[in-house]
């Protein structure tokens, strides 16, 4: 859920939204904010490496500015048939910009994000260097 912006926006747009964050305060803040607007947010405070998402459950998964490579298999599996993942995070080219993450643990290699969703239908893919160096993908899981 991070700062919760995407979960909040999706809930406000009428989607049934489920947010996950390892920080209890982030979960509480997002739930409280939407409750104040008369909207519901299903939220879970969890470390997804210890408690993975349920398989084939979500029509849409959104991940932004976060990279934890050992979560890719469970993210792939958590998508329902024909579900879509939107994923954006920094690439190694971000180092040249002098801001943001610098650890290889938090930076994608060229083409890595596309490869992580091999076998999915890629709806959109790009790697940019301005204003930040990020890779973005929209990919659909097969329907069977």
Image (spheres, rainbow, N blue to C red):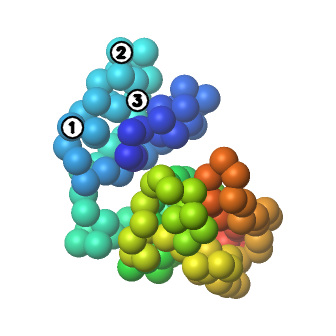
Determine whether 77 is above or below 2 in the image: below
Query: Is the residue marked by circle 3 packed among few (<14), some (14-19), or many (20+) residues within 10 Å?
Result: many
Q: Of circles 3 and 2, which is in front?
A: 2
Residues at discs 1 and 3 in contact (Cβ within 8 Å): no
Quarter residue 136 falls in:
bottom right
Q: Position of residue 99 (x, y in %)?
A: 48, 53
Residues at discs 3 and 2 in contact (Cβ within 8 Å): no
Q: Which residue is mark 1?
A: 25
Residue 101 vs residue 8, the one in the foreground: 101
Q: Position of residue 88 (x, y in %)?
A: 59, 58
Residue 121 vs residue 16, the one in the foreground: 121
Query: Marks 1 and 2, how far apart in space?
Result: 16 Å
Circle 2: element type: helix
Query: Marks 1 and 3, how far apart in space?
Result: 17 Å
The residue located at (67%, 72%) in the rendering is 141
Quarter residue 69 falls in:
bottom left
Q: Position of residue 6 (x, y in %)?
A: 52, 40
Query: Marks 3 and 2, how far apart in space?
Result: 9 Å
Q: Which residue is mark 2?
A: 36
Total numbered labels = 3
The residue located at (76%, 74%) in the rendering is 121
Q: Say whether disc 1 or disc 3 marks the residue closer to the N-terminus.
A: 1
Q: Say whether disc 1 or disc 2 marks the residue closer to the N-terminus.
A: 1
Left or right: 35 as drawn, with respect to 77 = left
Q: Which residue is mark 3?
A: 40
Q: Residue furthest left?
A: 24
Left or right: 116 as drawn, with respect to 74 = right
Circle 3: element type: loop
Residue 76 vs residue 142, the one in the foreground: 76
Left or right: 139 as drawn, with respect to 26 = right
The residue located at (31%, 50%) in the rendering is 21
Q: Of circles 1 and 3, which is in front?
A: 1
């Amino acid at each position: 859920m991070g700062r919760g912006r995407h979960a909040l926006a999706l809930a406000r747009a009428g989607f049934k939204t489920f947010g996950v964050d390892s920080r209890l305060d982030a979960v509480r803040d997002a739930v409280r904010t939407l409750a104040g607007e008369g909207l519901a947010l299903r939220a879970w405070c969890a470390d997804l490496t210890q408690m993975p998402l349920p398989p084939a459950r979500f029509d849409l998964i959104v991940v932004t500015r976060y990279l934890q490579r050992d979560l890719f298999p469970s993210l792939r599996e958590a998508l329902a048939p024909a579900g879509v993942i939107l994923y954006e995070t920094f690439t190694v080219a971000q180092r040249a910009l002098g801001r943001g993450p610098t650890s290889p643990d938090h930076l994608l290699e060229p083409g890595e994000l596309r490869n992580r969703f091999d076998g999915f239908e890629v709806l959109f893919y790009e790697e940019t260097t301005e204003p930040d160096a990020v890779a973005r993908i929209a990919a659909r899981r097969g329907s069977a």
